[in-house]
């Protein structure tokens, strides 16, 4: 009987082999306190950070044997002999040094240079390797401030020199020396990438990938598609997806309620719907039902375009809870949206025979107390509420499901508070977002959640006619609006994003409001913006949704969640100042009823090429997912979902716009690794721990430690 050799225990702390990379940046030769401060401006404080800061460009230094071979203007490298120095004739003129290749002369030109430095660097009669941009000036070849002055015994400069990002106080030479010293510290590490995937993609080892990426031979080597850069990007994505997979596993290990309905309430609602469920709705409902039937806790994101029917899917999920004898809560970010959900669901809830109630901060006195009593007694099947639901006196008899509308309005702490209202086990969690996000970004932002996507629209939705007109047509638009409002139409007028300043935007909105109110009368026009007290904003919205107002002048506060089916016209002023996905969200506020709707994009001419493309795409399609992909291609990941607010990771190497496919591969790989090696103590699992330490995924390491 053979006895397997004991396996080394996985490292509890950072592996010692990584220590040199996590030392202070000042331990690198040539990096003193001033350079360290400049590096810190680039978020580089250790050699590890410098190793993961790849070149962003390059300089082609063509080696030539003679000045006659130069093709000015270009950057060349050649050997020259220093003939003589020509000091400036008067103050403010440059110092010139005449150098020769033996057949032809070139002037080396220096402004504000010190004489002692020039004499030391360029002594008369000495040979020097000079590299810089050669140009013709009055028929004479000259190089102004050569980039490099080397002794012929020094190593020659690379024909293609990497260019790194800089901050004040840094030069390419300082960064280059720091990178060279860092690469000497880079150790070979055990391989954490699946061997089959690595071979299939032709990726080098980690340490070799870093060396290749830092030594490009031409512009093509800077592409994210090169094997070295792809591999390093994949390392970042794999570490990130391992962290999210561990977080997801941690949530799923948490005991939940096994909530299996018998379908009777859902069948009643389906029979009462004005049109059949879409395939995407049916698929999402089935995914949610399967999750809820499990004893572990559901943590699912329902992502759907405007008008794709998310609310019906949420109601079906709530009905599963009611069929099993439990309760559900639907959290809305604002009071007006909570009451709109109540109005939208009232008829369907009546068809199902369940009781729905609303609870907001404005509910007071006996009516509020009655809702609290009925909720605690289990007489309310579905509660629709705002942040007021988090209050301690709000108690459920048996909360099985929490639906959160628009994740970014509710923090993690609040979701945990909601989880505590589920009694012995936290409720299943369903998060709805109306913002179509490209799949790569959805996996980066919500990778710890299971994903259901609504990518079809119910058959009753009419397309919104979209036109783009220059701003000098504004009078004609107001005249057409006048005619439509006389026929009873309701319309939005969204004011421009003048600057990244709410105060300036607000001034523009107030000016437009005064102009339109003067034209249409005080009763017909309301203004809403982010600076208003919530109750004033809700009152203005209610006037527009149900009361006398027909025109709502607004900033982008109406971008998400406002549902007024009677509104058929959307005017967006200075449309070129909005992002593509934001324009799509705003347009989605109309086209919700039976009447034909239109969207007018007013722009300030002349349009830039990007703005022209943006408005053209909007006119071509209403597919939010295609629009989101185009937006990502044009603006980049951080701008599409607002990196600071989104929780989107900041990768040093991975490019979510160009390497989107790698994110899906990393997600599958991370989940597969954890299924086969849940504690990461096998050979590849231990290697993956090195990756997590290297890329500072401390959260993942804590989750492994917690089991």
Image (spheres, rainbow, N blue to C red):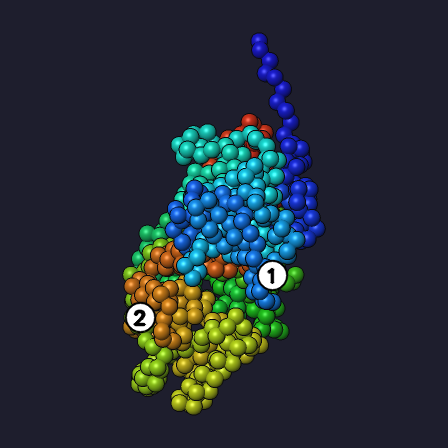
Within the image, what quadrant is residue 461 found in? bottom left
- Write down the residue under mark 2: 466
Within the image, what quadrant is residue 387 found in? bottom right
Considering the image in quadrants, where does the C terminus appear?
A: top right
Q: Is residue 40 left or right of residue 63?
A: right
Label 2 sits on a secondary structure element that is: strand
Q: Is residue 643 left or right of residue 168?
A: left
The residue located at (65%, 61%) in the rendering is: 392
Please state the horizontal and vertical placement of residue 375, each as a whole percent of the image.
57, 61
Q: Residues within 10 Å of mark 2 (few under 14, many from 20)?
A: many
On screen, residue 175 above or below 552: above
On screen, residue 280 above or below 486: above
Report the front residue among 87 and 477. 87
Report the front residue among 257 and 539. 539
On screen, residue 689 above or below 275: above
Please state the horizontal and vertical placement of residue 107, each as a whole percent of the image.
50, 54
Q: Residues within 10 Å of mark 1 (few under 14, many from 20)?
A: few
Please state the horizontal and vertical placement of residue 144, each as a whole percent of the image.
51, 56
> Can you tell which mark lies on residue 112?
1
Please state the horizontal and vertical placement of residue 251, each as a whole percent of the image.
56, 45
The residue located at (41%, 33%) in the rendering is: 202
Examine the rendering and report whether any part of residue 358 can be seen.
no
């Amino acid at each position: 009987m053979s006895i397997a050799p004991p396996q080394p225990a996985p490292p509890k702390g950072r592996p010692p082999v990584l220590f040199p990379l996590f030392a202070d940046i000042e331990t690198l030769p040539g990096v003193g306190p001033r350079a360290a401060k400049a590096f810190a401006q680039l978020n580089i404080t250790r050699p590890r950070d410098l190793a993961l800061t790849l070149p962003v460009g390059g300089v082609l230094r063509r080696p030539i044997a003679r000045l006659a071979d130069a093709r000015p203007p270009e950057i060349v490298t050649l050997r020259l002999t220093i003939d003589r120095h020509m000091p400036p004739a008067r103050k403010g003129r440059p110092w010139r040094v005449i150098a020769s290749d033996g057949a032809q002369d070139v002037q080396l030109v220096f402004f504000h240079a010190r004489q002692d430095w020039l004499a030391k660097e360029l002594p008369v009669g000495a040979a020097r390797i000079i590299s810089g941009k050669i140009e013709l000036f009055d028929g004479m070849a000259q190089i102004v401030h050569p980039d490099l002055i080397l002794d012929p015994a020094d190593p020659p400069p690379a024909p293609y020199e990497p260019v790194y990002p800089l901050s004040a106080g840094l030069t390419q030479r300082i960064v280059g020396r720091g990178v060279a010293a860092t690469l000497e510290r880079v150790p070979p590490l055990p391989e954490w990438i699946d061997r089959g995937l690595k071979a299939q993609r032709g990726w080098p080892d980690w340490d070799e990938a870093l060396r290749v990426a830092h030594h490009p031979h031409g512009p093509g080597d800077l592409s994210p598609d090169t094997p070295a850069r792809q591999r390093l990007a994949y390392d970042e994505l794999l570490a990130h997806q391992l962290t999210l997979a561990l977080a997801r596993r941690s949530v799923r290990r948490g005991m939940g309620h096994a909530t299996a309905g018998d379908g009777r309430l859902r069948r009643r609602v389906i029979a009462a719907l004005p049109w059949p469920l879409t395939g995407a709705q049916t698929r999402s409902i089935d995914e949610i039902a399967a999750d809820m039937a499990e004893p572990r806790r559901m943590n699912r994101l329902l992502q759907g375009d405007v008008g794709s029917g998310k609310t019906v899917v949420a109601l079906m999920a709530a009905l599963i809870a009611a069929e099993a004898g439990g309760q559900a809560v639907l959290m809305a970010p604002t009071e007006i949206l909570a009451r709109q959900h109540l109005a939208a669901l009232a008829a369907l809830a009546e068809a199902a025979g369940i009781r729905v109630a609303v609870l907001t901060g404005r509910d007071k006195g006996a009516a509020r107390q009655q809702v609290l009593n009925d909720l605690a007694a289990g007489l309310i099947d579905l509660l629709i509420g705002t942040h007021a639901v988090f209050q301690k006196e709000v108690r459920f008899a048996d909360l099985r499901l929490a639906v959160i509308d628009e994740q970014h309005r509710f923090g993690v702490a609040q979701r945990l508070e909601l989880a505590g209202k589920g009694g012995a086990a936290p409720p299943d969690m369903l998060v709805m977002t109306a913002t179509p996000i490209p799949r790569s970004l959805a996996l980066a932002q919500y990778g710890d959640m299971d994903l259901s996507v609504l990518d079809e629209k119910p058959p009753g939705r009419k397309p919104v006619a979209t036109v783009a007109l220059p701003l000098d047509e504004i009078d004609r638009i107001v005249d057409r609006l006048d005619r439509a409002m006389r026929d009873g139409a309701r319309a939005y007028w969204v004011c421009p994003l003048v600057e990244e300043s709410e105060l300036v935007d607000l001034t523009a909105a107030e000016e437009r409001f005064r102009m339109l109110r003067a034209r249409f009368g005080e009763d017909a026009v309301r203004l809403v913006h982010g600076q208003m007290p919530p109750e004033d904003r809700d009152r203005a919205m209610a006037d527009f949704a149900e009361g006398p107002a027909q025109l709502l002048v607004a900033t982008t506060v109406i971008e998400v969640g406002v549902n007024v089916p009677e509104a058929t016209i959307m005017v967006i002023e200075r449309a070129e100042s909005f992002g593509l996905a934001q324009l799509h969200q705003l347009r989605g506020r109309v086209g919700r009823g039976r009447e034909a709707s239109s969207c007018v994009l007013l722009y300030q001419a002349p349009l830039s090429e990007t703005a022209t493309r943006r408005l053209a795409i909007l006119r071509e399609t209403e597919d939010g997912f295609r629009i989101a992909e185009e937006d990502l291609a044009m603006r980049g990941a951080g701008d599409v979902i607002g990196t600071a607010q989104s929780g989107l990771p900041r990768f040093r190497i991975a490019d979510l716009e160009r390497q989107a496919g790698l994110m899906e591969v990393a997600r599958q790989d991370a989940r597969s690794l954890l299924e086969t090696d849940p504690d990461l103590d096998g050979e590849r699992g231990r290697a993956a721990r090195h990756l997590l330490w290297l890329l500072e995924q401390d959260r993942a390491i804590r989750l492994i430690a917690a089991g």
